[in-house]
Amino acid sequence: MSQEVKLEYQQKDMPFRRLGPSGLRVPLFSLGGWLTFGGTVVGDPVKEIVKTAIENGINMFDEAEAYSKGKSELELGRVLKELGVRRADYIITTKIFWGTRPGPNNGGLSRKHIIEGVKESLERLQLDYLDVVFAHRADHNVPMEEVVRAFSWVIDQGLAYYWATSEWTAREIEESKPLLHRERAEAEYAPLYKKYDLGTTVFSGLARGLLTGKYNNGIPDGSRFDTNKDIFKEKIAFLDSDDGKKQIEIIKKLTHLAETEIAELDCKVAHLALAWVAKNPNTSTVILGATSPEQILDNLKALEVIPKLTPEVLKKIEHIVSNKPSSRPTYGRPALDTYGRLPVT
């Protein structure tokens, strides 16, 4: 039975990049549901946000089974069905690990939870398949072979087209191959980008809102930190520390750079931050968060800033942040670019 299409996807000026070594092309900016869909945003506002995304080049939506204990997937599945977007025109990713309820087998990366978790996510999303399923974390209590075989089974059964990893170390990714904080992305993973042609999906490009400048003078009412104090209690405490105050000063300097110092930029610090992340050739897509359609449209202004990030501008940014990572020590182990594949038996 053919699907009734009510809303057509509009690419507009959205660039697309390959997701790592795969043939899947993903938008440079995508939309995530963490802390928003099913949490602070429910009902019609979710529909308006997703509609705005579809009409402005964003056709990739990032979820996780644990986001709002499954409610985020429920909201996204509902609005996509109501909007009537052609399934072939959008990309859905979700992540498996944390589960949605307590229980000895309701989390982690056992074969049981991977397969059952994927099936439950599909039910909530009202879909027949996922485009990409992520292992949300590594699970050191499960043999890597079991993890790889379970995700391979999910793909073989047509429940997902690709599987990927989230927050795995380079060593964990390396171990899985034969059968990703700036330091990790640029230093630890660097040999893997070259060796396996990996790509990254980047979350928290605005450092959970810090790089909007909204927290420069405290925690505003209604902000993400204000409405999620339990989740961000460590970050809130950090902002009151000496290191936190230094970080705020860096953000203020970046704000001056974006808004005043370099006339050609003439943008918000948030646009500069998103453009800087997107400029990295190893970035496949940058996941945005939004509580309103207006936030979607504002964040997409970063597309206009990317071509303005000349080597001179990037050098000034590096001078301000002064946190470019160096390669991690190997402690006597082979470097990752020479680290051999484990034998397959």
Image (cartoon, rainbow, N blue to C red):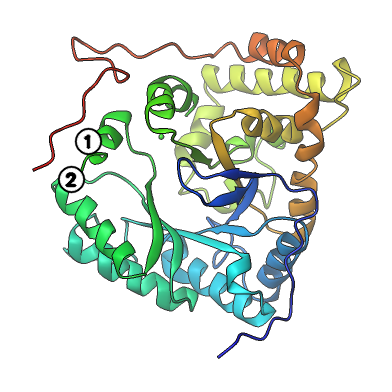
157 lies above or below 201: below
For the N terminus, the image quarter is bottom right
Q: Which mark is residue 76?
A: none
Quarter of the picture containing the C terminus is top left
The residue beneath circle 2 is 144
Quadrant in the picture for residue 158: bottom left
Please tell me which residue is depicted at 68% across the width and 23% down the height of the picture: 251
The residue nearer to you, when weighing 310 against 101, is 310
Q: Amino acid at mark 1?
A: Glu
Q: Residue 177 location, x and y as percent?
A: 27, 39
Across and down, in percent, residue 115 comes to 26, 67
Give the crowd class for mark 1: few <14, some 14-19, many >=20 residues within 10 Å. some
Q: Nearer the viewer, residue 162 or 230?
A: 162
Say which quarter of the image contains residue 155. Answer: bottom left
Can residue 174 be seen in this snapshot? yes
Q: Residue at x 64, y 76 (%)?
A: 43
**Secondary structure beneath disc 1?**
helix
Q: Tell me residue 145's x, y (percent).
A: 15, 48
Q: Dot 1 corresponds to which residue?
A: 175
